[in-house]
Image: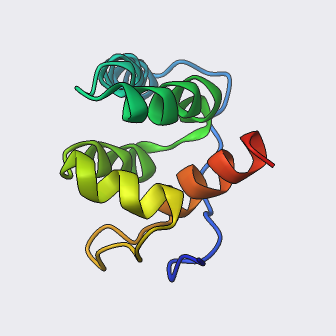
Amino acid sequence: MECAAGTPGFGVQTGLMSEHNKNNETWRRRLTFRSWHRGTKELDLLFGPFADARLADYDAPALAQYEDLLMAPDPDVYRWIVGLEPPDPAYDTPVLCDVIAFQRTRHA
């Protein structure tokens, strides 16, 4: 199943820690914690490693898309990621495509 959103194009973070980047780092840490503690072990094991591996590369708009995805209902998100059904158009974003691609490469 392909994502309609296409290939993700996220801004790469620079090494400089401006005030904005410090806030993004706090945001990333919170999102990583939430990724490992979603409520279902299956999604913890899908989102946790993804967050550890990829959130450092995400800019603020991508972090916002990821946060939205974390708020989606667990059963729906699981079905989208494992390819049982197409994503809801509201969540079919480059971030979801990145999560799906990450899972495919981990289990290929």
User: Is 10 rendered above or below residue 45?
Assistant: below
Badge count: 0
| Residue placed most toward the observer, 80 or 95 | 80
**Residue 74, position in %: x, y?**
24, 46
Question: Residue at (60%, 51%) from the top-left corner?
Answer: 11
State the residue at coordinates (63%, 46%): 103
Which of 95/2 is in front?
Answer: 2
Q: Is residue 17 left or right of residue 57?
A: left
Left or right of 59, for residue 14: right
Tell me how the rendering is colored: rainbow
Residue at image x 65%, y 43%? 12
* x and y, in percent, of residue 5 in the image: 51, 77
* Residue 72 vertical position relative to residue 7 in the rendered view, above or below: above
Q: Please, which residue is most extreme toward the front here?
A: 84
Q: Which of 94 and 9 is in front in this view?
A: 94
Quadrant housing residue 43: top left
- For the residue pair 95 and 78, the one nearer the viewer reads as 78
**Which image quarter holds the N terminus?**
bottom right
14 left or right, relative to 3:
right
The residue drawn where x is 30% and y is 80% is 89
| Side (left or right) of 54 relative to 23 | right
Residue 50, given in percent of the width and then of the height, sits at: 56, 34
Extreme residue toward the right, this view: 108
